[in-house]
């Protein structure tokens, strides 16, 4: 997989994830957080069903512990914490917190993956991105309520996701992206929906005549099916460094916040937050530009 294709797929994944904040916030107005995550995962699994290959299920059997870990940490836990966190913060704030994932991924990847290296370029990009995210996180909610619990839940989402990416990278013998993702999403959907049914009250009558809600839910499921499969394909590629492609996740706070400011009433931009977003764009430029080759003067 060449560099251009790697970056393009990473950008597509991150832009899809960025759009999940304003659409997820809208759906949370009608559906409890955990139940919403379960329904979203079930629909996503159904979408992927048409692309899996039957012969690959048997090949996954030797790796069932990896599949279970991936299902619980990357899917069930992250979707629950994402919705619970997003229900307590503005969608733009949610995008900003999740935008800290590149720094977390870089640090953890350098520690746990032997061929990952923290060079000056990655360090500079990581530092600028984190400074911007800290600045953005200083914004208070419109009603002045505390967002601490939401921030903690979203940060736990980021850490769990980053650790699982590294785990899958180290278990690179698994090459069946769509099939692995389908099985993981289906398992996590069962877990999450069960937890939601026990802890929350919800009636499917809510969907009656609410086509905007149905559309938003289908879009969220598409994001899950498409983005998670593409990302899994990326991190399994032998020539891809987790810390390198994770830099593109810095697009999430900028694109996510911009979409939220456009589509979510009451979630407005400030000159302070726009300046912070400009730092994120600079950090992406630093992280993705190719270093100049030294000229041979001999």
Image (tube, rainbow, N blue to C red):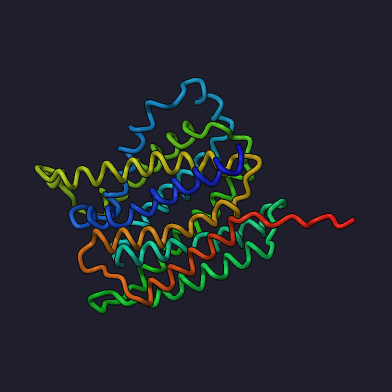
The quadrant of the image that shows the C terminus is: bottom right
The quadrant of the image that shows the N terminus is: top right
Q: Given the current orientation, which residue lies at the most extreme left position?
A: 209
Residue ID at (54%, 57%): 247
Residue 108 in percent (x, y) is at 61, 59
Q: Given the current orientation, which residue lies at the most extreme top position?
A: 55
Residue 99 in percent (x, y) is at 45, 62
Q: Report the side of 138 relative to 117 (left or right).
A: left
Residue 174 in percent (x, y) is at 59, 35
Q: Nearer the viewer, residue 38 or 286?
A: 286
Residue ID at (31%, 70%): 269
Classify residue 261 by image quadrant: bottom left
Q: How many marks?
A: 0
Residue ID at (39%, 39%): 225
Q: Given the current orientation, which residue lies at the most extreme front position?
A: 297
Classify residue 94 by image quadrant: bottom left
Residue ID at (72%, 52%): 114
Classify residue 156 by image quadrant: bottom left
Residue 4 in percent (x, y) is at 56, 43
Q: Nearer the viewer, residue 116 or 266?
A: 266
Q: Given the current orientation, which residue lies at the most extreme right position?
A: 298
């Amino acid at each position: 997989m060449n560099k251009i294709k790697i970056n393009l797929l990473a950008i597509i994944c991150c832009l899809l994830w960025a759009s999940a904040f304003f659409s997820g916030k809208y759906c949370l107005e009608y559906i409890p957080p955990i139940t919403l995550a379960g329904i979203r995962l079930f629909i996503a699994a159904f979408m992927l069903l048409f692309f899996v290959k039957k012969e690959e299920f048997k090949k996954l059997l030797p790796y069932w512990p990896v599949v279970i870990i991936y299902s619980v940490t990357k899917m069930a836990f992250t979707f629950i914490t994402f919705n619970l966190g997003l229900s307590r913060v503005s969608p733009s704030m949610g995008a900003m917190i999740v935008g800290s994932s590149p720094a977390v991924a870089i640090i953890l990847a350098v520690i746990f993956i032997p061929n990952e290296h923290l060079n000056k370029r990655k360090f500079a990009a990581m530092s600028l991105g984190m400074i911007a995210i800290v600045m953005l996180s200083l914004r208070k909610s419109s009603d002045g309520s505390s967002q601490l619990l939401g921030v903690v839940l979203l940060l736990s989402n980021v850490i769990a996701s980053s650790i699982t990416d590294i785990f899958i990278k180290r278990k690179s013998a698994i090459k069946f992206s769509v099939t692995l993702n389908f099985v993981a999403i289906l398992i996590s959907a069962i877990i999450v929906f069960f937890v939601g049914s026990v802890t929350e009250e919800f009636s499917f009558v809510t969907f009656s005549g609410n086509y905007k809600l149905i559309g938003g839910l289908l879009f969220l499921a598409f994001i899950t099916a498409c983005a998670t499969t593409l990302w899994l394909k990326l991190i399994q590629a032998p020539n891809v460094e987790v810390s390198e492609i994770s830099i593109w996740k810095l697009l999430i706070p900028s694109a996510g916040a911009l979409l939220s400011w456009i589509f979510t009433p009451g979630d407005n931009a400030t000159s302070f937050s726009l300046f912070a977003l400009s730092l994120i764009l600079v950090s992406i430029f630093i992280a993705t530009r190719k270093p100049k080759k030294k000229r041979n003067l001999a």
